[in-house]
Each structure stands twice: as structure tokens, then as C-alpha cells.
Amino acid sequence: MSENTNDIKLDALPIHIRNSVKYFAGKIIPALGENLQSITVIGSSLTDDFKPGRSDINTVLVLNGQSINYLKTIASLARPMSRKKISVPLLMTPSYIERSLDVFGVEFLDFQLNHQTILGEDPFTSLNFKKKDVRLQCERELKAMLIRLRQGYIAAAANRKLVRDILISSAKGLAPLLRAMLWLKDSERPTGAEQTFNKAAEEFSIKLDSLITTEKWSHQKLRPDENQIDDAFKSIYSKVDQLAQIVDKLEV
């Protein structure tokens, strides 16, 4: 891979993240040298969900190979990356991607739907997935989320802020799962969280208003009271349970 940062393609990125991504690429390209195959921007920074100054920018680096030396190299850049709202990048190799499609189909489907490769060859567009693998992962993730909600509520010991954070995390985690469920139904997949919740509600005949409300808590300076927290918890727990039953019965 060339160490020339002039090779990066920023034009397709939203204008409000270009400077940060250019800075990131300018640090990563010379640091990783020939071991770096590609840099891809993923996630909410490419959608209307992104909130400049608050949201992080997520990336995937595809490497020829991995070693602790490369981890140390990237770790040394963590602080300046954080100041630019760049999250720690996901590190992958081509063989890792190829061997992980059956276990991380939900994540890779989301990357495939919404990404911009700014350097090197696009690692996601040509990927193919088996519906039975994706359906199984959706079911497993939803049932695991039920456990985390129960255990998290108990561990929070009625701390309202902690329960609020658990609910926000659950709402964010449900968006890619719902997009994967929509993919299983050959249905349109929005990239934004609220649009995803609305589309899934329509496709699966389930009310998901509580997810929309809870997801917005992370972007707005709201302090829901105890009754609002309890109502949101009961609703989201019920919806996750319903979704687990729906995906369990999906024929693919």
C-alpha cells in the first residue's frame, strides 16, 4: 500500500467528517505501511444519526497480517485519534472476513449496507451470506439481549442513570439486528436508526416507539424520571422478547 495520503478518496464522505478522517488516514498510512490493504469508514458517521462533536467515527482497517507490533502502533495513536472523535479501528484480514461470514453476518451485512472505502479495495461489497446463518445469529443475539437486560437491571441496583444507559445501549444494538431481519425478509433496509425501527415495526407488525424514544436519549440532554425509566424498560424487554419469537419462526 502506498504511503501517499493523496491516494485517499474523501469526496463521498459527509463533509463534516472529512477533516477528521483525513487526519486519521495521514497517521495510519505511514504507521502501517505495506501491511495496510484498505481503510473503510462505517456506521452512523455516514448517516443522519451522526451528531458532530458527540458521535464517534468508526473505521475498519484490513491488514495483510496482524501482530502485537501493529497493535502497539495503533495504540500509540489512540489519544490523538480520540481528540478527533475517531474510535479505535476494527482490525481485520481478508481471511478473517472470509471465515467469519457465518458468525458475524449481522455486522458484515451492516458494513456492506453502509460504508465508504477511502483507500484500497472495497472489502465488503462482494460478500455473500447464508440466510440460515444470519437468522440463527439474530435469534442468538436477541435472546442474549434479554439476559443482559435482566442482569443489567439487577446489577444497576435501581440506579436510574445506569438503567437508562443499558436501555440506550440495547436500542442501539437492536438497529443492526432489525436491519438483518429485514434482509431476511428481502425488505428495504434503512441506514438510520429511527427509519429502521419504523420499517421493522411495519414489516413485523410490532410497535417499536419505545426504541425510538430511548435511542434519542443518547442525543438529547434528557433526564427521564423513575416512571419513564421503568416504562421504557418494560416496553423494550417485551419488544426484544417478541422479536426473538418472530425471528425464531422465520422461514429462510
Image (cartoon, helix red, strand yellow):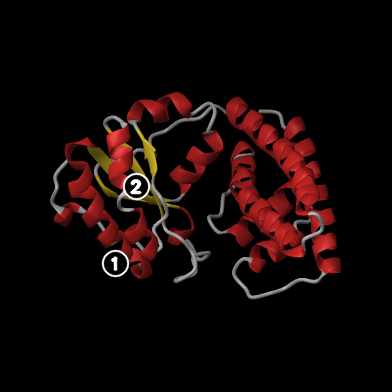
Pinpoint residue 69: horizontal percent, then vertical percent. 27, 36
Q: Is residue 104 left or right of residue 72?
A: right
Amino acid under label 1?
A: Asn
Dot label at residue 19: 1
Residue name at image x 41 percent, y 30 percent: 97
Dot label at residue 75: 2
Residue name at image x 76 percent, y 71 percent: 224
| Of residues 135 and 152, the one drawn nearer to the viewer in this rendering | 152
Is residue 205 something that shows in the picture? no
| Of residues 245 and 234, the one drawn nearer to the viewer in this rendering | 234
Pinpoint residue 32: horizontal percent, then vertical percent. 22, 42
Q: Is residue 75 above or below residue 45?
A: above
Dot label at residue 53: none
Q: Is residue 30 left or right of residue 250?
A: left
Is residue 37 something that shows in the picture? yes
Residue name at image x 26 percent, y 61 percent: 23
Task: Determine whether the residue tagged by mark 1 lies in a helix, strand or loop.
Answer: helix
Quadrant showing the N terminus: top left
